[in-house]
Structure formats: C-alpha cells, structure tokens
Amino acid sequence: MLSGPPRFWKLSALAIAALLLGNLPADGIERAAGEIGTEALLKEAGAACQIASELEQSRVVWSSPDYEHHAALIVGGKSPESEGNGEQAYKLCLFDKQTAKVELQEIGPELFK
C-alpha cells in the first residue's frame, strides 16, 4: 500500500515543465543540422550518380537518403549515342554514405509510363 502520492507528484509544476521543455531547443538544432546534412548528402550523391550513369542531360528524378548505409537515387537522361539511339533511359543508383562509391543498375523506361 502506498503511504502517499508517488514521488513524481512531489515535483513542482515548474520543474516538470522545465524537464519536458528543456530538450526542445536542442532537438530543433539537431533536426536542422540533420536536414542540412541530408541536403548536402543528396547533392553529393546526385552529382556522383549523374556522372557515373554516363547519361546525357542526366538529372535525379527520385532520391531517398533514408537507408542506413546507402542513399538510393534514380537518374534519368538520354542514353549515349554510342550505346543506343539517344532514347530516354533510367538507372537506379546506390550511393555508399561511407565510401562515396556508387553502384548502378539500368531500369526499364516502361516503369515510368
């Protein structure tokens, strides 16, 4: 049987509010730093994937930095004249966040119609 109110209730309302709200500014700063880091990561990954794709007029059409070790991107552009007839082509690119190496896999354009 309890002999009194729980210890939690012995804290003043001001102390409880300070505990709960004390981490908000730090969380906001951390979240903002994460967004800047994510933006920089996607710029680096996008540039690396566009160059590695060897597509003409390449552009990133989709990206997701949410994987633990990789960022996934889809790069679209025209296939080089030497490889084909300049048709629209797409490549899936996995960008390694640690080594900045990329892996590419061609994707059929029928998936984007």
Image (cartoon, rainbow, N blue to C red):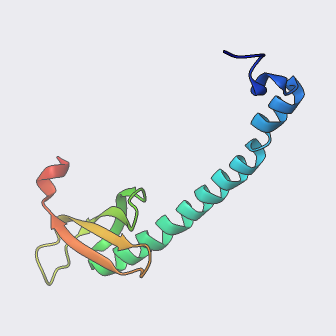
Query: In the figure, residue 39 lies in which quadrant?
Result: bottom right
Name the residue: 31% across, 69% down.
Answer: 94
Q: Is residue 31 above or below residue 106?
A: above
Total residue callouts: 0
Q: Nearer the viewer, residue 53 or 103?
A: 103
Residue 30 on image: x %, y %: 67, 55
Residue 48 on image: x %, y %: 40, 77
Name the residue: 34% across, 62% down.
Answer: 72
Point out the image quarter for the N terminus.
Answer: top right
Q: Nearer the viewer, residue 90 or 66?
A: 66
Residue 32 on image: x %, y %: 66, 53
Q: Nearer the viewer, residue 10 or 59?
A: 10
Residue 45 on image: x %, y %: 43, 71
**Left or right of 90, for residue 51:** right
**Left or right of 88, for residue 10:** right
Name the residue: 11% across, 73% down.
Answer: 85
